[in-house]
Amino acid sequence: MPKPIEAVNDFVVKFANVNGSGSASANGLFAKSVLRMGIPASSRNIFPSNIQGLPTWYEVRICEAGHLGRRGGVDMMVAMNPQTWNKDIAEIEPGGYLLYDSTRDLPPSKFRDDINIIGVPLTEICNRTYTQMRERQLFKNVIYLGALSALLDMDPEATATLIGEQFKGRDKLIAANLHALKLGRDWALENLECPLGVRLRRTDKVGDSIFVNGNDTAALGAVYGGATVCAWYPITPSSSLAEAFSAHCHRYRRDPENKKHKFAIVQAEDELASIGMVVGAGWNGARAFTATSGPGISLMQEFIGLAYFAEIPAVIFDIQRGSPSTGMPTRTQQADILSCAYASHGDTKHVLIFPKDPNEAFTMAADALDLADRLQTPIFVMLDLDIGMNEWLVPPLAWDPNRKYDRGKVMTAEQLEAGVEFGRYLDVDGDGIPFRTLPGTHPRRGAFFTRGTSKDRYARYSEEGHDYVDNMQRLLHKFDTAKRLVPQPEKRMATEATKFGVLYFGSTTVAMEEAFEALDDRGVHLDAMRLRGFPFADEVADFIADHERVFVVEQNRDAQMRTLIVNELEIDPAKVVPILHYDGTPITARFIVKAIADMVSVVTLAPLRKVRS
Amino acid sequence: MPKPIEAVNDFVVKFANVNGSGSASANGLFAKSVLRMGIPASSRNIFPSNIQGLPTWYEVRICEAGHLGRRGGVDMMVAMNPQTWNKDIAEIEPGGYLLYDSTRDLPPSKFRDDINIIGVPLTEICNRTYTQMRERQLFKNVIYLGALSALLDMDPEATATLIGEQFKGRDKLIAANLHALKLGRDWALENLECPLGVRLRRTDKVGDSIFVNGNDTAALGAVYGGATVCAWYPITPSSSLAEAFSAHCHRYRRDPENKKHKFAIVQAEDELASIGMVVGAGWNGARAFTATSGPGISLMQEFIGLAYFAEIPAVIFDIQRGSPSTGMPTRTQQADILSCAYASHGDTKHVLIFPKDPNEAFTMAADALDLADRLQTPIFVMLDLDIGMNEWLVPPLAWDPNRKYDRGKVMTAEQLEAGVEFGRYLDVDGDGIPFRTLPGTHPRRGAFFTRGTSKDRYARYSEEGHDYVDNMQRLLHKFDTAKRLVPQPEKRMATEATKFGVLYFGSTTVAMEEAFEALDDRGVHLDAMRLRGFPFADEVADFIADHERVFVVEQNRDAQMRTLIVNELEIDPAKVVPILHYDGTPITARFIVKAIADMVSVVTLAPLRKVRS
Amino acid sequence: MTYITKPRLHHPQLPTNKLGYTRRDYEGAISTLCAGCGHDSISAAIIQACFELSVEPHRVAKLSGIGCSSKTPTYFLGKSHGFNSVHGRMPSVLTGANLANRDLVYLGVSGDGDSASIGLGQFAHCIRRGVNMVYIVENNGVYGLTKGQFSATADKGSKTRKGPANTDSPIDMVSLALQLGASYVARSFSGDKNQLVPLIKGAIEHEGAAFIDVVSPCVAFNNNPESTKSYEYVRGHNEAVNRLDFMVDRTEITANYAPGTAVNIVQHDGSTLRLHKLALDYNPTDRVAALNYLARHHVSGEVVTGLLYVEQDHGDLHHFLETVDQPLNALGEAELCPGGDVLAHYNAAHR
Amino acid sequence: MTYITKPRLHHPQLPTNKLGYTRRDYEGAISTLCAGCGHDSISAAIIQACFELSVEPHRVAKLSGIGCSSKTPTYFLGKSHGFNSVHGRMPSVLTGANLANRDLVYLGVSGDGDSASIGLGQFAHCIRRGVNMVYIVENNGVYGLTKGQFSATADKGSKTRKGPANTDSPIDMVSLALQLGASYVARSFSGDKNQLVPLIKGAIEHEGAAFIDVVSPCVAFNNNPESTKSYEYVRGHNEAVNRLDFMVDRTEITANYAPGTAVNIVQHDGSTLRLHKLALDYNPTDRVAALNYLARHHVSGEVVTGLLYVEQDHGDLHHFLETVDQPLNALGEAELCPGGDVLAHYNAAHR
Ligand SMILES: Cc1ncc(C[n+]2csc(CCOP(=O)(O)OP(=O)(O)O)c2C)c(N)n1
Ligand SMILES: Cc1ncc(C[n+]2csc(CCOP(=O)(O)OP(=O)(O)O)c2C)c(N)n1
Ligand code: SF4
Ligand code: SF4
Ligand SMILES: [Mg+2]
Ligand SMILES: [Mg+2]
């Protein structure tokens, strides 16, 4: 038996439950209690594509150092689901801990001898205390929370306060929960050795950070950014973004007097309709968006091409999930990059932005609405299930009170009246971005016909090759302009000069940042650049040029971001080395460290040459 | 006035007409008459997205040497459309000829003094001879054909025979047409100097070649290849493929006795349904296909991803047109390459094949049906408007009488009965291709559930990361197998050793082949490889490796084939130089020669280095 | 097809409307459709209706899908913004446009292929939502622009030039619209301008989803007498249940009808629909009866036309969504951005 | 959800059907739906119907879209091939499968979101084509799998947990199917197995598009008494117009009904549908009357159930397309490839 793991404020607790059994609230209370003790933590929900009765897990990483990506491995398993018992037991690190319901005893074969087994007769305690089925089921969760509270030396006050806030106004419920919590805690204190080797200690590392999921913050960003029209179709993991937008709007966007709505949200019949509505609203001057996931992106392809070619503002939040096809609807991936960047038939290129966490999801949601109006084209906000549906600990959201919406180039009635020349597809400023007019602006001037067919600079239908080429070239020029307007990359230099660089983006960031240290320790020094927008700023090309080998870390099979880099920046593929993780779980620092360290040894041996995969 | 162009069996005649005016038949007669004189010719129809009343052109290139790509420039313009008069006149080469209706005379300003003007009072002749509006309109076309017949020294017998064949059985019509033809011919012989400097002379260069369009031959290929289910939705330029399949089937695929159909053709309600039907039929063991164009490809994205991930045979003919969006529906392009190769969200890769002309469209249509069954995945036959809707002079179609259909790996009732292990996604042969069973095969064994979600090797639903990764890796392996099964590239070495290579494909071939000579003359020697399938055979990588610079000639803006080359073969972009033509007209040898010659001088000066575009 | 602006010589004698505009001010580019195409007559009727109603041309947004019918917005109201969207998906684009600015008149023009084949779903759902619009289907039973394949409204058994006969049951757009909850439903014939113009005017003034199915023969591909979408057939089987006089205000009511033969329906904006009954047993305010009547007469091959159903105060999508009166596209930071305090609360609530 | 094969201990006492199969031979994997979900009862009814009809399990192809309802094919007929396609597009996949092999029984299972929202177009068009199939919509008025948003069949004004109230007019799938030409149309309730099983049997034997709308409460998100899709509501408002006895051949007819209260309908395959009238004025062979009856009773909040319409000898898509009797997927080179002479002619004709 290896010695029990000893760790203060730095371990992983995983809860194995059955979905629909009401464990979510208790597990959430656990994570929040840790935070209330000033200890940084992050949580990840691993759930099935199902409503009730199947296995679900809740993983909490506690890390005073503030590394909040998924770590991998489990130090303490709270195994509440017989269906997955074997799998769950197997996942525990040697010397780790198992908390289980010891009411009916299990054969030794069911356990491992290199872990610490902690039995709590949860069912027995429940049945002794409660009569109703539902009560027994629900409070069982609170009781194991109580036991954990003792075993990990949690501050019971913190948990109590949270319960008070959560059930505010429903005093009966508060009392009942506190009682259940106490039941568990007392039993553990009486019957078990508390605390364990893994334990918590109050500190002050959380500061003013907030614990939120990216769908909620992105939705709030859309509210702050001035989105007034949302058309959507339910699909995991994007539904909660639209639903959060609805909730936020009902709170913050109703006329104080008459309670009327300064927003319009339509649950469309499908994604073809939701994007169509967004295009219609954008054409007519409202800030509009939709939220979807892979299958929706596929269905939106035709309309996206129209918006590109007719130059209509639109914002699309793609909460990426396991794919292709219906794939793994409740798992995370970054695999829609190509289908978004080159969406639709024919020659098209689209603008993408990559938030790294819920905080950036808020700001970038608002940025996307400005970019759409400025560039008059669809803007993709590339989120994923990990950012969108998990609670992250991030800095508080901030909004510059002086920030004004950039409505882009819209010609006014005054300008038209004054006789300013208007050509819908005329590049007056040399940036490839033409002026548009909104329907109903002027009685005699500025009206034009919007179409997906080829046209001349004055929006007149034309089948002339030169009109077509002229327009397509301007669109390329506009795309070039975009690279200066999208969120710029962030650079991070290694502690010492190195020929290695790494590119990463989105939800990988948190794991990557943790990996730097570990790599440094191993003597692997990396200059790093976080990609935040596509098309790529010139800096990205320079960064690659400045290094001999550049790793591109992404969460998909086909190295899709690397494809964009090679193709759009004319980079020799031999220079950019793919680091790929795509099994549907969030990428970990452990994975990155190993993968890059291994590669470095390989490429250090072999000098720069064509790698033909 | 430059001296009149002198050319025998080598010039371009262009007819400018109004669509719906019945000129098509007369213009077709002209082209076929030339062929009947043993002189190679090709024709191109330039028509609007409209049914009646707009300009339409018919361009005939006559070339005894057998170069039948579009040449560019016009030696003889038959200007029958006042709307486009100026444009048409401008297009004539200096020293060229203009044939027009001189009934009401035009001011000199309407003409050019560097061309030869030939007036024929067509309307006057018509009105003199015919009373009815429609007659006058129709026969006017035949009369100018008559005039041309005299001016170009055509064999009137050839034309007469064709008229006989065309209106077989309708003797009145035959007589009327012959009369009109004679009217024009006689008038010209009496009143004009015949023949002109450009003229025809009977020869024997046509041989047994046939004059056909690719949609018709591809449809016939589908009949020979054993397609039994066709689900389609009308869209230019693909509709005539499905319509031809219907016509061919009604002729060749009805039961001799009871006249019942050995085929099922459904005009679906849209492209989502047409591809859905193809997937359903392929799943159930029938050879099925659809024909569409860009917008349809966009709408099919979700189903294509399902077919990729669930591994269902399907054949998709993409008759590419001007894009993006509705684009230029009646113009040609090769711009759907990326949206087909990486169709659908998530990590996907698809098999594409590239016929060069109507003859290859026939064989590759049949090949595609075999490949779909063998690889159990969607196969894209990448045609375009130029191949699909224009009449080409190509070698006669051939079919090996011993050819058997490759139905791929389908486990039989006998095998199941014998207890052969069946796992729907089990790689039993190490080629990444699993066995499938068809519904209804065996009472107790072989049934499985097909789904777009992640699963294990036995088609059981699974959300386990390792099952998912295992399956995705096998799909990559299967894709690797595909590169040996798709049509292999064709190599053509230069007359002398060279560091330059060129890659081309599809409808570009005919122009490229003509360009070689001209380039040789200019001292530009190129090794060449014609791409015929994707994924690329190893030969393609070798070919690129063997050259310092390789040009990639394609008909789109974004060098999409080059993207596939760089991305899939890990090629340094600096090595592959894009040669792009994408204004919607078919690419010409003239364009290729100039573009490559210019490039060669550039790159010869500048040694290999990163080109950052 | 290019956007030819015709010389606007304002002959003083040209009649003008309330706004001082002449009929020419409501025209568009020259049509490029086939001579005799029914669609052109519908464009003329739209021009006439807008002129007579004194609609401000630039306050109309005209949207369409893809098809010959969907091309027509280029041929009327040259001063209005137009949007030729994608095939079958105009309804969603129109819905979004309408959400962005409730103050314009939304005119959706589509074809039977565009709305009954590829677009059936979007057609149905935008009707269900009660989008405030005039939705006109120019119904010829074929795909004109792609050269004559049959659409979902084609008669069973009808033959196209090339292909075999149609074997699918035809879709009746009007019955569908009624079932889906449209609050103003009419059918007319491109050849009957007197009937069509008032129906369009009524639809423009109606608040909610107004649908007009206009039989509009395709002379190029589907005008053979057997086709129920041909000039000859409709002329022979047109059974108008009523005649509509559209009046901007009641004072205009002049004509006297025998008792029981006329009804006045006052719309939300005070305008009046005066219906002169031709089929005395027909009641245009009973949805179920209307459906039943249509079905019965369809069986006997009649083409029932007129104002088939109208429901007042049904409300429209904005009404249902309780949106503010100002157009959403006119709201700025002040109205839309909750500001710093709210954000502070939000942050506090997530600690 | 994994494909658990249960121990098949054949207790001799388990009743067997003509083929010697027991009911267990028609079962599938263990359901992973919520306890009490209506969908599970429908799966049980399908198992019962197939068992009683002695359908060969492997001669059934079960297809679905995406949703809780669309998951159910995993829970019945474990020996049949199944296809969980994409959301809302099962009808096209089923149509294609049917074209490939006319000899199997095609069972399409879908949800109200899958068929009435995203899938409305495909639903409508496959019905119009008369595809020979049994099309069952497990109708609960919500999106179950995505956690309770309302679908296109949701009641107007109904509230979901999170969102605001539904403001769209609901779609009545049965009326739609009738309008679109379905030749067998029924509605039932997941809680009424006695009514549902014979309706499914009749549908399987019917040649052509058979549609069954089954109200199937979602206990997780839409089972509140106000919902017309709740157990309580349907029990309270279920108005069955008739009871169906399905008989494989007439000899089985035993029960005697008072004159005029029962009709026998013989199907193309000789099987007989004996309808015991509950609403004496209801005639299930008059499409228009059926539509009218449904509309009238819908207004009064009743849920009309039973065999609502049946038309014999309507024919199916293969009949319309005149396809050969053998399955198309069984034809080989000999039947399909025209061969060299034809090609020679083709070449000659193009010179
Ligand atoms: C996605 C897509 N599929 C197919 C087409 C080709 N298409 C253009 S118009 C049309 C049919 C138009 O028919 P209808 O709506 O009845 O208009 P009509 O021409 O008869 O007035 C089709 C199939 C298209 N433009 N887009
Ligand atoms: C293209 C696409 N959009 C959205 C989804 C997400 N989705 C899965 S099931 C479902 C709705 C299912 O509702 P219903 O058909 O009524 O089935 P139920 O769960 O109610 O039985 C949705 C929207 C999807 N799978 N695919
Ligand atoms: S093809 Fe038919 S619909 Fe199109 S313009 Fe001509 S007549 Fe009109
Ligand atoms: S969520 Fe509703 S529909 Fe889905 S399984 Fe549960 S009860 Fe059934
Ligand atoms: Mg039409
Ligand atoms: Mg449902």
Image: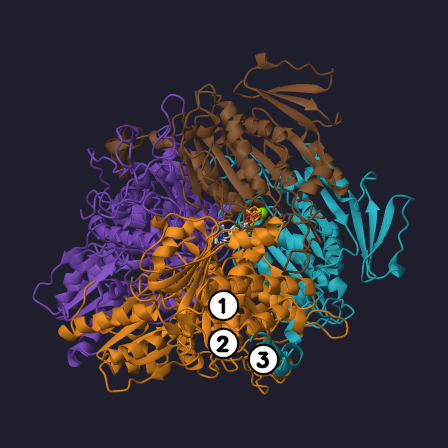
Chain colours: A orange, B purple, C cyan, D brown
Task: Kindly report which numbered mark, 1 or 2, lies closer to the viewer in this rendering.
Answer: 1
Q: Which mark is residue A359?
A: 2
**Residue that label 3 marks:** A411
Q: Nearer the viewer, residue C257 or A43?
A: A43
- Amino acid at pointer 2: Asn
Task: Kindly report which numbered mark, 1 or 3, lies closer to the viewer in this rendering.
Answer: 1
Report the side of B533 relative to B167 (left or right). Answer: left
Q: Is residue C126 visible?
A: yes
Q: Residues within 10 Å of mark 2 (few under 14, many from 20)?
A: many
Q: Secondary structure at mark 2?
A: helix
Percent of width and height locating residue A134 = 60, 51
Tell me the CA gap for discs 1 and 3: 66 Å
Q: Nearer the viewer, residue A288 or A66?
A: A66
Q: Which mark is residue D152?
A: none
Looking at the image, the residue that sits furthest to the left is B496
- The picture quadrant where one finds residue B408 is top left
Q: Nearer the viewer, residue A321 or B138?
A: A321
Label located before the other in sequence (2 or 3): 2
Q: Nearer the viewer, residue B334 or D278?
A: D278
Task: Kindly report which numbered mark, 2 or 3, lies closer to the viewer in this rendering.
Answer: 2
**Residue that label 1 marks:** A150
Q: Quadrant of the N terminus of chain A?
A: bottom left
- The picture quadrant where one finds residue B520 is bottom left
Q: Are marks 1 and 3 in contact (CB under 8 Å)?
A: no
Q: Residue drawn at (79%, 44%), measured in percent from left and top?
A: C286
